[in-house]
């Protein structure tokens, strides 16, 4: 795969009722690619803090597999994000974490979510449950994304303009939260309405 093929193009929609989205997917004939799975994500930063400042994501994810991801060069138009993304499966989550720390990267944030993955034609649709709300992401080329939004009748839902980490940072600022990580335990007992607070 060439670097030109390593492009992530996606849209993120705030969809509080994921059961509604799932019914729309089933009615459209979508295929369930991966049942609901828990994800634990570690975001890394260097001592100078230049990764985040430069729009670079270095992430280690554990779900059914361990994956190391690098992202950069984000741009957005009509709520559709484009950025370079390179991802590789690693055999051992803990050992990869040790390697990254030995290279001078420290964990700046841990965030959790549950994800269910569907496929409709050329599009991958994920239903994400985060500690602060539910979202639908559609990944494909821009034209296909808009077709899927229309086919699933998702146009009425809000297009989110930030990553999950950016949404979390904005929630922390607006609500005066002090926790470092975005875990379900950290949000236990908090009543957060993302639609009202983030934008």
Image (cartoon, rainbow, N blue to C red):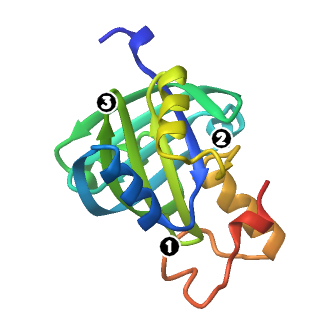
Residue situated in front as seen by the camera: 109 or 49: 109
Image vertical order of residue 149 relative to residue 154, above or below:
above
Depth-wise, is mark 1 or mark 3 nearer the camera? 3
Which residue is drawn at the image coordinates 57% and 68% (left, top)? 133
The mark found on residue 45 in the picture is none
Badge 3 density bin: few <14, some 14–19, many ≥20, Cα 10 Å: few
**Whether residue 93 can be seen here:** yes
Secondary element under disc 3, as helix, strand or loop, is: loop
Residue 36: x and y in percent read 28, 63
Badge 2 density bin: few <14, some 14–19, many ≥20, Cα 10 Å: some
- Residue found at the far front of this picture: 27
Which residue is drawn at the image coordinates 23% and 52% (left, top)? 34
Depth-wise, is mark 2 or mark 3 nearer the camera? 3
Circle 3 is placed at which residue position?
A: 121
Residue situated in front as seen by the camera: 152 or 86: 152
Of the numbered discs 2 and 3, the one sitting upstream in the chain is 2
The residues bearing labels 2 and 1 have C-alpha atoms spaced at a distance of 20 Å
Of the numbered discs 1 and 3, the one sitting upstream in the chain is 3
Circle 1 is placed at which residue position?
A: 183
Secondary element under disc 2, as helix, strand or loop, is: helix
The residues bearing labels 1 and 3 have C-alpha atoms spaced at a distance of 33 Å
Which residue is drawn at the image coordinates 39% and 13% (left, top)? 5
Asked whether disc 2 touches disc 1, contact meaning CB atoms under 8 Å apart, the reply is no
Residue 192: x and y in percent read 68, 77
Circle 2 is placed at which residue position?
A: 52
Secondary element under disc 1, as helix, strand or loop, is: loop
What is the quadrant of the N terminus in the image? top left
Residue situated in front as seen by the camera: 109 or 21: 21
Of the numbered discs 2 and 1, the one sitting upstream in the chain is 2
Badge 1 density bin: few <14, some 14–19, many ≥20, Cα 10 Å: some
Residue 186: x and y in percent read 56, 80
């Amino acid at each position: 795969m060439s670097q030109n093929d390593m492009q992530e193009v996606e849209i993120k929609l705030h969809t509080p009722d994921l059961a509604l989205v799932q019914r729309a997917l089933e009615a459209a004939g979508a295929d369930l690619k991966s049942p609901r799975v828990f994800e634990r994500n570690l975001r890394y930063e260097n001592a100078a803090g230049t990764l985040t400042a430069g729009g670079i994501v270095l992430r280690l994810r554990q779900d059914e597999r361990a994956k190391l991801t690098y992202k950069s060069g984000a741009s957005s138009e009509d709520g559709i994000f484009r950025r370079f993304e390179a991802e590789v499966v690693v055999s051992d989550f803990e050992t990869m974490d040790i390697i990254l720390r030995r290279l001078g990267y420290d964990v700046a944030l841990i965030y959790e979510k549950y994800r269910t993955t569907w496929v409709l034609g050329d599009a991958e649709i994920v239903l994400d449950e985060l500690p602060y709300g539910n979202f639908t992401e559609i990944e494909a080329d821009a034209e296909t994304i808009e077709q899927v939004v229309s086919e699933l009748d998702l146009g009425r839902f809000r297009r989110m303009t930030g990553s999950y980490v950016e949404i979390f940072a904005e929630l922390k600022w607006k609500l005066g939260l002090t926790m470092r990580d975005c875990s379900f335990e950290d949000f236990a007992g908090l009543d957060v309405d993302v639609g009202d607070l983030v934008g």
